[in-house]
Image (cartoon, grey):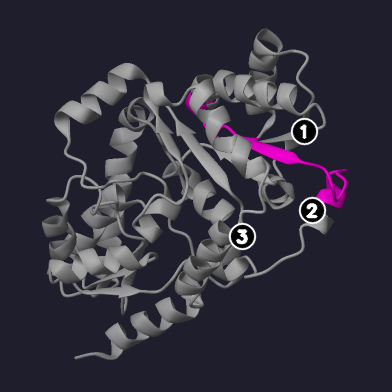
Amino acid sequence: PKMQAQGCKTLFDMDELSVMGLVEVLGRLPRLLKIRKQLVQHFIDNPPDVFIGIDAPDFNLRVEKPLKDAGIKTVQYVSPSVWAWREKRIHTISAATNLVLALLPFEKEFYDKHQVPCTFVGHTLADDIALEHDDSQARSQLGLNADDKVLALLPGSRGSEVGLLSETYIKTAAQLQAQNPALKVVVPLVNEKRKAQFIAILNATAPSLNVNLLDGQSNLAMQAADAILLASGTATLEGMLYKKPMVVGYKIKPLSYWIFKTLFTFNIKYFSLPNLLADEELVPEFLQSECNVANLTAALTPMLNSDNKELKARFLAIHEKIRLDASKQAANAVAELINAN
């Protein structure tokens, strides 16, 4: 809608392309392949100055390759996680793109190593979130006092994540609240379906837990919190940008984990963005069986009883590093590509 408001003409409804999950993709595969073929033909017949694929690399790179072969300049905005796993995809990216726009500095280092054109533009979240901010307004909006101790739980946005993580998160919060009965617990949930799912697990696990369930408002929950327990993903970056101590606890189904570990080689020491950006463990990470109540409680307890000044200073330094006015940097890089011979 925002792009349409700026005059963007849509060839297909974005909802047709917004498909996640292996089974869901397979069910829509014939339609997705048809759309991809039609897009390629449209842009070959009506060549633009540049084609910019935004994220969705499995779809966009296969559009970009034939366009580049036809002499159309192509840009991939948001790098695939090629630096983390399936490193050989770098050859596909090189063949499909004239330029990659990277959100994170270590991504550019990876592309430079492989001699693939890449510009580090920074992250739009780092632009949107102020370097320093007053948490009191967020607390006021959530009915919390300035001197409350607040723990935010973010068990993910997908049903599988909420299903696998909520029980452990709830038990951890209950143990922390038993140690400090005044502890406030806030849980933002992305929609009514996830909220109902979480409530069912809460009632079966710790119905006496004193918890404030929020409709969305994850940004307010993070701003108001003294510490956050959350799943991996962009939320870890957002929590870091709000300068909040956090513990990352994540689980996937055991069979899926076994398949990933067996079939793929991972080239990273950490899986949360704060640690990847720092290249050291700034925030504790617990995966699979290590994501248990004892570990999570032990990691969160000191965070809730400290001012965490050193950690917050590290977060601020990273924030400054990736706060470059990403949209302007990206526009400049694309304009330079268009104007190059």
Categorize mark 3 by other alpha carbons within 10 Å: few (<14), some (14-19), many (20+).
Answer: few
Q: Is residue 246 above or below residue 159?
A: below
Looking at the rendering, in which quadrant would you find the N terminus? Answer: bottom right
Question: From the viewer's perspective, is 261 left or right of 166?
Answer: left
- Give the x, y percent position of residue 40: 25, 59
Dot 2, how many residues are within 10 Å of its Cα: few (below 14), some (14-19), or many (20+)?
Answer: some
Among the 4 quarters of the image, the one containing residue 109: bottom left
Residue at disc 2, secondary structure: helix
Q: Earlier in the sequence, mark 3 or mark 2?
A: 2
Q: Are marks 1 and 2 in contact (CB under 8 Å)?
A: no
Q: Residue 24's x, y, as percent?
A: 38, 29
Separation of residues labelled 3 and 2 (CA atoms): 20 Å
Q: Which residue occupies the foreground of this view, 273 or 80?
A: 273
User: At label 2, which amino acid type do we have?
Assistant: Ala
Q: Is residue 170 magenta?
A: no
The vertical placement of 273 against 187, above or below, is: below
Residue depicted at x 69% and y 28%: 192
Single out the mark in the foreground, 1 or 3: 3
Residue type of the residue flagged with mark 1: Leu
Q: Is residue 190 in view from this perspective?
A: no
Could you say which disc has been placed on residue 183 in the image? 1
- Picture disc at residue 309: 3
Q: Are marks 1 and 3 in contact (CB under 8 Å)?
A: no
Find the magenta span and give its range: 139-161
Task: Name the residue beneath numbered marker 2.
Answer: 138
Indicate which disc, 1 or 2, sits on the residue closer to the N terminus: 2
- Label 1, label 2: how many angstroms apart (C-alpha)? 17 Å
Where does residue 230 sit, x and y in percent of width and height? 55, 38
| Nearer to us: label 1 or label 2 | 1
Q: Alpha carbon of mark 1 to alpha carbon of mark 3: how far?
A: 21 Å
Q: Secondary structure at mark 1?
A: loop
